[in-house]
Amino acid sequence: MIYELSGDILLSDARAIAHGVAPNDNFATGLAFNLREHWPSLYKDFRNYCHLYHPKSGELWTWVNAEGQRIINLMTQEAAYDNGAKPGKASIEYVNRTLRALRQVIEDEKIESLALPRLATGVGSLNWDDVRPLIYKHLEDLDIPIYIYTLYQKGVKADEKAKK
């Protein structure tokens, strides 16, 4: 079941947080920046992964923190190939691919709950009215709570429990 709420996604109790990035992203803005500040090793490990495996737009990479919470990096944007370069724009095609892959990860790894932002609408520059239906199309029938943080409120813990 999908629930739309507002608050600080970093305070989510969901077992996984998914967010959009670009291959070789420097995590300099938006939620990626907040994740980088919150878990510096996430960024370091992401950069190492990109260096070793050269991921493409439309793929994903999962990182697990010390508490066992997964951060799923959905590569919804064109790559930033030069060190420090700004990532490219997101595309509906990449969002579709990453959401299909995300669904597979949720099923394969038996993820019990998921939080995600308004995917690919910040730095990715897509329109939420175009992205929102894709999230519902790919994830709505999963038998887990999925929390879409539609409004970011720093330091505010959303009432996810009331939504279960």
Image: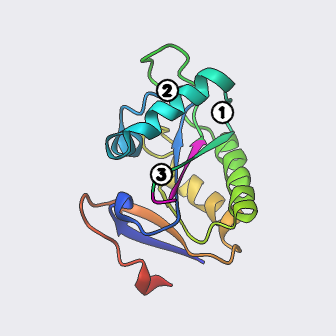
Number of labels in the image equals 3
Residue 122: horizontal and vertical position, in percent?
Answer: 42, 43
Badge 3 element: loop
Q: Earlier in the sequence, mark 1 or mark 2?
A: 1
For label 2, the crowd category at 10 Å Cα-Cα, with few meaning under 14, some 14 to 19 and many 20 or more, is many
Q: Nearer the viewer, residue 55 or 52?
A: 52
Residue 42: image location, x then y, percent: 46, 40
Give me the residue at 62% from left, 60% from top: 135
Q: Nearer the observer, disc 1 or disc 3?
A: 3
Q: Earlier in the sequence, mark 3 or mark 2?
A: 3
The three-letter amino acid code for the residue at tag 1 is Ser
Label 3 packing within 10 angstroms: few (<14), some (14-19), many (20+): few
Task: Please name the amino acid that badge 3 sits on.
Answer: Asn
- In this picture, is 43 found above or below 50? below
In terms of secondary structure, where does tag 1 sit?
loop
Residue receiving disc 2: 87
Tag shown at residue 65: 3
Residue drawn where x is 55% and y is 17% of the image: 81
Most common secondary structure along the magenta stretch:
strand
Question: Which SS class for mark 2?
Answer: loop
Residue 90 percent location from the top left of the image: 57, 37
